[in-house]
């Protein structure tokens, strides 16, 4: 099953975001009610009690957490890119598809997206920035991410190193 979706307008972005949030809220409410304390932790640790809110299948709870926030960052990124380049359509590769997370239909605009606790965790910001920087075909290159601990000095150092790439640290998702 392909995990690629083409976006042409903000309404598509808003509709999908609402689906992700409402599905996540409903599934988590059911999970919270499935047991108390240690039973809840046991389920989260050992059972496939998570749910992919976009592609609608059971998954590991931690994977659900990671994917949900990456999906939301991708949607904010598409919203930003649609605003900057309204004549373009963008394909988002959700999940663990190879290639770039967001690509314009003519491949002139590329973007990597992620959500992390800190942008220097596992060198994530630098790896993704290097990946788009090394693309010689795209005219516009982006890395858009969310972190609860943005580390502005680290971000600025990466910006200086890869000045060809626009790095956008989201304040909220």
Image: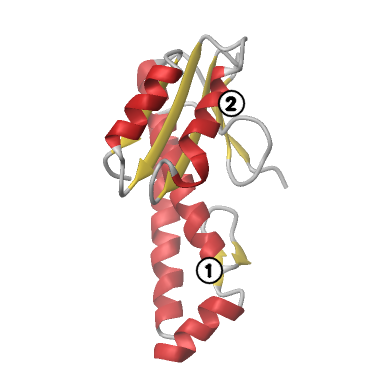
Residue corresponding to mark 1: 61
Residue 160, by quadrant, is: top left
- Residue at horizontal 61 percent and vertical 74 percent from the top: 48
Q: Residues within 10 Å of mark 1 (few under 14, many from 20)?
A: many
Which SS class for mark 1? helix
Residue 143 is left or right of residue 131, and the answer is left
- Residue at horizontal 44 percent and vertical 19 percent from the top: 161
Question: Which labelled disc corresponds to residue 131?
Answer: 2
Q: How far apart are marks 2 and 1 (CA)?
A: 29 Å
Nearer to the camera, 112 or 24: 112
Name the spot of residue 169 as percent of width and height, x first.
Answer: 33, 34
Regarding residue 50, the answer to whether it shows in the image is: yes
Residue 84 is left or right of residue 95, and the answer is left
- Residue at horizontal 48 percent and vertical 46 percent from the top: 71
Name the spot of residue 55 as percent of width and height, x first.
Answer: 60, 54
Name the spot of residue 95 as percent of width and height, x first.
Answer: 60, 46
Residue 56, by quadrant, is: bottom right
Labels 2, 1: front one: 2
Q: How crowded is mark 2: few (under 14 residues within 10 Å), some or many (20 or more)?
A: some
Which SS class for mark 2? helix
Q: Does residue 135 sit above or below 78 in this rendering?
A: above
Query: What colour scheme has been applied to the protein in the rendered image?
Result: secondary structure
Name the spot of residue 24 as percent of width and height, x first.
Answer: 43, 63
Q: Are marks 2 and 1 in contact (CB under 8 Å)?
A: no
> Considering only order in the chain, which callout, 1 or 2, is on the residue closer to the N terminus?
1
Q: Does residue 143 sit above or below 95 in this rendering?
A: above
């Amino acid at each position: 099953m392909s995990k690629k979706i083409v976006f042409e307008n903000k309404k598509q972005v808003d509709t999908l975001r609402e689906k992700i949030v409402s599905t996540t809220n409903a599934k988590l409410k059911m999970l919270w009610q499935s047991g108390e304390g240690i039973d809840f932790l046991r389920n989260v640790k050992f059972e496939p009690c998570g749910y992919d809110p976009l592609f609608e299948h059971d998954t590991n709870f931690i994977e659900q957490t990671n994917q949900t926030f990456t999906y939301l960052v991708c949607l904010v990124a598409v919203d930003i890119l649609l605003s900057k380049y309204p004549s373009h359509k963008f394909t988002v590769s959700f999940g663990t598809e190879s290639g770039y997370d967001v690509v314009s239909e003519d491949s002139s605009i590329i973007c990597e997206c992620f959500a992390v606790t800190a942008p220097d965790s596992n060198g994530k910001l630098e790896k993704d920035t290097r990946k788009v920087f090394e693309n010689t075909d795209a005219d516009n290159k982006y890395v858009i991410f969310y972190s609860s601990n943005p580390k502005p000095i680290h971000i600025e150092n990466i910006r200086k190193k890869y000045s060809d790439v626009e790095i956008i640290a989201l304040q909220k998702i």
